[in-house]
Image (cartoon, rainbow, N blue to C red):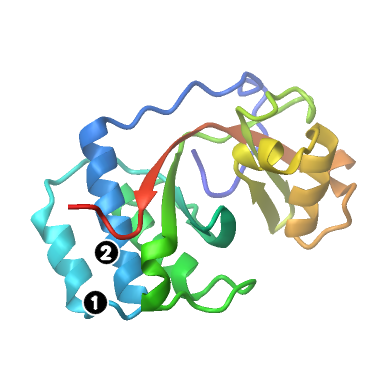
Amino acid sequence: MHTELERNSGASGLPDPVVVTDAVQTDLLEVARTAVAVASRSLGSGALESAMHALPTTGLHAAAFVTLTEGGELRGCMGMLDPERPVRDSVAEAAACATRADPRFRPVTPEELPRIHIDVSVLGPMLPLADPLSWRLGTDGIVVQLGSRRGLLLPEVAEENGLDRTAMLDIATRKAGLPKDAWRRPEAIVAVFRTDRFGGPAVAIR
């Protein structure tokens, strides 16, 4: 997976599933919880570094998104798209940004944490498509890129919002700051990816 998407006539197939082991899922969720607690000022700034050092080292490098919900409603969602970065670092930064830097929401407060649910999405390779409509709704996430502008939607957005493929592409294009039908332009690149998504409450039940 590359941060900057490139046209590749040999990459027109659809992506394989992404599988993160249970042990790594547990560790990444703990990183996300700690990052959210630190970003909301429920824990001190040193807690995240301590938590990262206490966990076993994983060699997994991947992009990641962290989604926060409260009572089933979106409370924050941010991602780190560098596929060469250690996934633990991607999750930590995405969680912190979702907590305090999503421009759509005010920062999460410590009082909210018992009501917050965290979902972590680890992204697999992004594969450019020859046909921008030839992907699996609800299974594949999409990226629309035109020049330096890029918009991304995770796979679950389709089902959660009752969107078809065209609507997904329109929204991803608008997220890139482009006219909604710009994905139809010959120079636009539409790519798809899979995720492994897992999560739990922001405050772990011990």
Tell me if residue 86 can be seen. Answer: no
Tell me if residue 65 can be seen. Answer: yes
Relative to 135, say whether 113 is above or below.
below
Q: Where does label 2 land, which residue? A: 34
Kind of element beneath mark 1: loop
Along the line of sight, the residue nearer the viewer: 3 or 102: 102
Q: Where does label 1 land, which residue? A: 43
The image shows residue 110 at horizontal and vertical percentages of 36, 77
The residue drawn where x is 50% and y is 78% is: 107
The image shows residue 128 at horizontal and vertical percentages of 66, 32
Q: Amino acid at mark 1?
A: Leu
Along the line of sight, the residue nearer the viewer: 140 or 8: 140
Other-residue count near label 2 (Cα within 10 Å), few / some / many at <14 / 14–19 / ≥20: many
The residue drawn where x is 13% and y is 51% is: 55
The residue drawn where x is 75% and y is 22% is: 134
Kind of element beneath mark 2: helix
Taking 162 as reference, is 123 left or right?
Answer: left
Other-residue count near label 1 (Cα within 10 Å), few / some / many at <14 / 14–19 / ≥20: some
- Give the quarter of the image for residue 105: bottom right
The image shows residue 142 at horizontal and vertical percentages of 66, 39
